[in-house]
Image: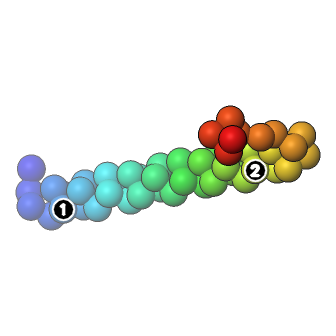
Amino acid sequence: MATGQISRRRRLVAADLAEENAEVLRESEGEEASAAAEEEVFDVVDEKDY
């Protein structure tokens, strides 16, 4: 495989991984926001607060 093809393949893999990482980050931020909203709505108290 030529060097140009390897570099192109690496760029494509890196772009794909960056996209996946961004998606995971968005999902985890959404879960955190959802948990915070649920806590507020249901007035959930963490046991370690006492």
**Residue 18 image point, x, y percent:** 41, 58
Q: Secondary structure at mark 1?
A: helix
Q: Nearer the viewer, residue 32 or 24?
A: 32
What is the three-letter code of the residue carrying label 1? Answer: Ser
**Whole-Å distance between the Cαs marked 2 and 1?**
43 Å
Q: Residues within 10 Å of mark 1 (few under 14, many from 20)?
A: few
Q: Secondary structure at mark 2?
A: helix
User: Left or right: where does residue 9 sit relative to residue 16?
Assistant: left
What is the three-letter code of the residue carrying label 2? Answer: Ala
Q: Which mark is residue 36?
A: 2
Tell me which label, 2 or 1, sits earlier in the chain: 1
Q: Residues within 10 Å of mark 2 (few under 14, many from 20)?
A: few
**Residue 28 image point, x, y percent:** 60, 48
Above or below, comparing residue 42 to residue 4 in the picture: above
**Residue 10 image point, x, y percent:** 23, 56
User: Left or right: where does residue 13 sit relative to residue 41?
Assistant: left
Q: Nearer the viewer, mark 2 or mark 1?
A: 2
| Residue 17 appears in the rendering | yes
The C terminus - image quarter: top right
Q: Which mark is residue 7?
A: 1
User: Left or right: where does residue 49 sit relative to residue 13?
Assistant: right
